Image (spheres, helix red, strand yellow):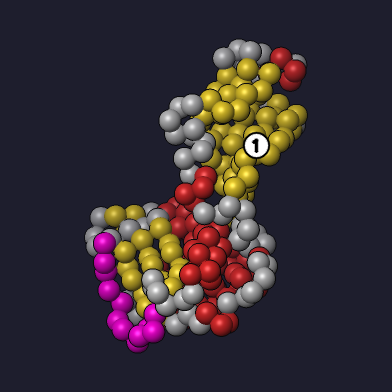
């Protein structure tokens, strides 16, 4: 059995213009990532797939199928209806309207999964159409250290937050900003650690790319 943890929403290759196809593949990541994490936390699993692909198609009447471990749900996605401006609310409202077409198509055979998708969409809307998560949290010496992530339709941001043991924030800085495409950021950060003098952030190749002199924070991290 595979836990469902991925969601994608975009048109099939060649259906849209190159420009808007690139835009939607970046701009759908915040809601898709949010829904993937939300479903993953439920531990809902299936034998055949671990992700859902809501695929914009000219022949959206086609039945749901499983391909490459993805539940493929054909849906209508009109390019001319996609917002021209990069606006968080209008873009996500468009995507949500497309999702609901697919959800209605799924509900007879995948009722539990569709209920989770609906609940996840409502949570995403309540969070103002932003996906936020904590990538790493550690207690280092007399501090809590966190790598906090922020993802919306226009950008991804990584912040380093250092708090005292009584949860008082004493350092909060944005250390990385990229496009919302996961290929732009997913390998850029992996861990945070201290050596007694400095605090370091590393990438997936364990290269240090950010450092903070922890003596300026007033305590020693180790």
Q: In this view, does 38 lie to the left or right of 48?
A: right
Residue to which mark 1 is pinned: 175
Residue at disc 1, secondary structure: strand
Front residue of 219 and 95: 95
**Could you tell me which quadrant the C terminus lies in?**
top right
Q: Main secondary structure of the magenta part?
A: loop
Where residue 37 appears, x then y in whole percent? 47, 54
Residue 167 sits in quarter: top right
Is residue 205 placed above or below 157 in the rendered structure? above
Where residue 155 appears, x then y in whole percent? 62, 53
Q: Is residue 106 left or right of residue 137?
A: left
Is residue 198 placed above or below 207 in the rendered structure? above
Is residue 188 placed above or below 39 in the rendered structure? above
Where residue 209 appears, x then y in whole percent? 56, 28
Residue count near mark 1 (Cα–Cα under 10 Å), binned few <14, some 14–19, many ≥20: few
**Could you tell me which quadrant the N terminus lies in?**
bottom left
* Residue 165: in magenta span: no
Residue numbers of the magenta segment:
56-68
* Residue occupying the point 49% across, 26% down: 207
- Residue 107 visible, this orientation: no
Where residue 80 appears, x then y in whole percent? 56, 82
- Residue 213 visible, this orientation: yes
* Residue 64: in magenta span: yes
* Residue occupying the point 63% across, 63% down: 129
Farthest residue to the front: give it.
Answer: 18
């Amino acid at each position: 059995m595979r836990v469902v943890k991925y969601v994608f929403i975009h048109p099939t290759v060649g259906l849209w213009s190159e420009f808007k196809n690139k835009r939607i593949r970046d701009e759908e990541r915040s809601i898709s990532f949010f829904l993937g994490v939300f479903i993953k936390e439920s531990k809902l699993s299936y034998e055949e797939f671990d992700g859902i692909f809501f695929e914009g198609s000219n022949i959206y009447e086609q039945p749901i199928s499983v391909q490459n471990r993805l539940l493929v749900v054909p849906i209508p996605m009109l390019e001319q209806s996609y917002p021209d401006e990069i606006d968080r609310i209008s873009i996500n409202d468009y995507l949500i309207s497309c999702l609901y077409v697919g959800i209605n198509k799924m509900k007879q055979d995948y009722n539990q999964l569709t209920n989770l998708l609906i609940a996840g969409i409502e949570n995403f809307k309540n969070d103002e159409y932003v996906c936020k998560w904590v990538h790493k949290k550690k207690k280092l010496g007399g501090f809590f250290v966190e790598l906090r992530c922020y993802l919306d339709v226009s950008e991804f941001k990584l912040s380093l937050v250092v708090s005292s043991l009584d949860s008082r924030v004493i350092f909060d800085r944005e250390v990385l900003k990229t496009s919302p495409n996961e290929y732009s950021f997913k390998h850029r950060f992996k861990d945070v650690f201290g050596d007694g003098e400095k605090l370091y952030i590393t990438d997936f190749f364990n290269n240090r790319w950010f450092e903070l002199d922890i003596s300026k924070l007033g305590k020693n991290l180790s």
